Amino acid sequence: MPGGELLVLFGPPAVGKMTVGRAVCAASDFRLFHNHHTIEPLHEVFGQQSPAFRTLNAEFRRRVIEEAAVHDVRLVFTTVWNLAGDGDAAYFRSLVAPYADRGLPVRFVELYADLDTRLARNDGHDRLAAKPSKRDLAASEAHVRAREAAFTMNTSPEVTLPGDQVLADFPHLRLDTTDLSPADAAAHILAT
């Protein structure tokens, strides 16, 4: 039986995706592929607003996930997802397809916390060490606020979004990280 698995950890910026992903990996044989593994080198070359950045970022992520599925890697992938976007829903469905098509488990874990909590976390040492593009704190805070205004990054029982159609096909856990330590979040994720 193949041993691969994909755990997609999603939520808004500064909610703790990378930190929780690291905790999951530390407590298991999962490997971490956080969203800034592709963002940082492409940001340096093209800038994040360029068409080349968007194209290559999407392609690199897709290829890493494809290869991880082929090689039965248990992978944690962290990402920000605009659940209201039809294009985002199609993209995320295509990302998980290599695992799902091979009969490997795919699970989604949604992290959420209020904006004030996330802004307080925005200048955390681990976050800044792993994400050089976030070291300009004023720009990073503006990015968190802009994403908050422009995207729907968490599910809601009151609204059905295109992303909900993807989530309906897979196990989906929703965790409030406001007062949850990374180790406790990881333990809950792995137990579920």
Image (tube, rainbow, N blue to C red):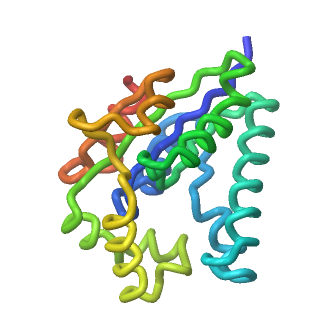
Q: Quadrant of the N terminus?
A: top right
| Residue at screen point 70% across, 71% down | 53
Quadrant of the image occupied by residue 156: top left
Q: Is residue 142 left or right of residue 80?
A: left
Q: In the rendered view, does 56 fall on the left or right side of 142?
A: right
Q: Position of residue 176 (x, y in %)?
A: 24, 44
Q: Quadrant of the C terminus?
A: top left
Q: Is residue 94 above or below residue 136?
A: above
Q: Quadrant of residue 50?
A: bottom right
Q: Position of residue 55 (x, y in %)?
A: 74, 62
Toward the viewer: 103 or 145? 145
Report how many numbered discs are placed on residues in the image.
0
Does residue 131 lie above or below 138 as drawn? above
Quarter of the image holding residue 123?
Answer: bottom left
Residue 41 horizontal/vertical position (percent): 71, 74
User: Image point 48% across, 51% down: which residue?
Assistant: 81
Q: In this rendering, is residue 126 above or below 111?
A: below
